[in-house]
Image (tube, rainbow, N blue to C red):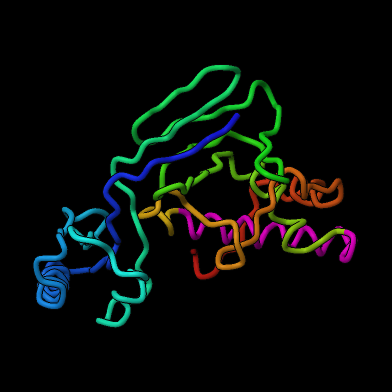
């Protein structure tokens, strides 16, 4: 199976503000700096946040993120609107707007590049020739690919240490659900969140640690 994408309108998430006034001020600043070369919008309030998005009507600068950072908006990221996903396989071609859902049959793992993953994937266009793969699975199955990636059982073969890591990873995941809502998923798979390496990283010892601490999280002061 081959999956490719075509880009829709590429908007940039410029910021998420706690007040509408701050969002409108950001909108005014962007329009003042970039003028008629951009379109800026303030999205309706969602979850207590007012998000500001912008796209270039004319040609984008060589590095849009740097251009935005230089005028006081660091940490922006692109959000493709209306892109298409093209799937080719077994002599058939399917082109869909937005995103598609890929779900392996039974309990089979999905192979992505050199890695395998449990659960299913949402596939969406995130820019020209760019695909965003979002792995969806339940928390305990997710931990099977996190605990051995964060604390390798071959280096740390102590079961109790791996149990502590399992509780820490479970706690972190629950506490940070929705951190990446703007990008369409809950949590990333890199050290910026916690490393998730999929089914290929699973190990019997870390699997046991997760099973024996199932549902346990760390709390402090009732939270």
* Residue 121, image quadrant: top right
Residue 81 in the image: state x and y as whole percent: 29, 45
User: The magenta stretch spans which residues?
Assistant: 154-177
Would you place residue 7 above or below residue 169 in this image? above
Would you place residue 140 above or below residue 178 in this image? above
In the rendered view, does 204 fall on the left or right side of 165?
right
Inspect the magenta stretch and tell me whether residue 155 lies in it: yes
Count of number-bearing discs: 0
Would you place residue 85 above or below residue 129 in this image? above
Inspect the magenta stretch and tell me whether residue 56 lies in it: no
Magenta stretch secondary structure, dominant: helix
Residue at 50% over, 70% down: 221
Q: Nearer the viewer, residue 201 or 128?
A: 128
Q: Quadrant of the N terminus?
A: top right
Residue 4 in the image: state x and y as whole percent: 49, 38
In the rendered view, does 128 fall on the left or right side of 150?
left
Residue at 81% over, 52% down: 206
Residue at 18% over, 55% down: 43
Residue 40 in the image: state x and y as whole percent: 15, 61
Residue at 73% over, 43% down: 199
In the rendered view, does 108 fall on the left or right side of 223?
right
Residue farthest to the top, as pictured = 91
* Residue 96, image quadrant: top left
Q: Nearer the viewer, residue 16 or 168?
A: 16
Q: Nearer the viewer, residue 193 or 161?
A: 193
Residue 195 in the image: state x and y as whole percent: 65, 60
């Amino acid at each position: 199976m081959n999956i490719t994408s075509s880009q829709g309108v590429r908007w940039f998430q410029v910021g998420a503000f706690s007040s509408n006034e701050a969002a409108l001020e950001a909108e005014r600043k962007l329009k003042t700096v970039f003028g008629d070369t951009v379109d800026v919008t303030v999205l309706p309030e969602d979850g207590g946040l007012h998000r500001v998005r912008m796209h270039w009507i004319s040609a984008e600068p060589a590095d849009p993120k740097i251009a935005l950072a230089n005028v006081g908006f660091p940490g922006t990221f692109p959000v493709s609107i209306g892109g298409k996903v093209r799937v080719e396989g077994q002599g058939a071609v399917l082109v869909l707007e937005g995103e598609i859902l890929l779900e392996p049959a039974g309990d089979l793992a999905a192979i992505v590049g050199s890695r395998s993953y449990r659960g299913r994937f949402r596939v969406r266009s995130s820019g020209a020739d760019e695909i965003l793969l979002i792995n969806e699975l339940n928390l305990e199955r997710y931990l099977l690919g996190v605990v051995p990636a964060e604390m390798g059982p071959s280096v740390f073969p102590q079961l109790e240490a791996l149990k502590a890591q399992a509780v820490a990873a479970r706690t972190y995941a629950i506490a940070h659900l929705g951190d990446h809502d703007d990008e369409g998923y809950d949590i990333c798979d890199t050290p910026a969140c916690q490393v998730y390496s999929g089914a290929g990283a699973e190990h019997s010892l870390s699997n046991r640690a997760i099973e024996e601490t199932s549902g346990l999280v760390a709390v402090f002061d009732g939270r």
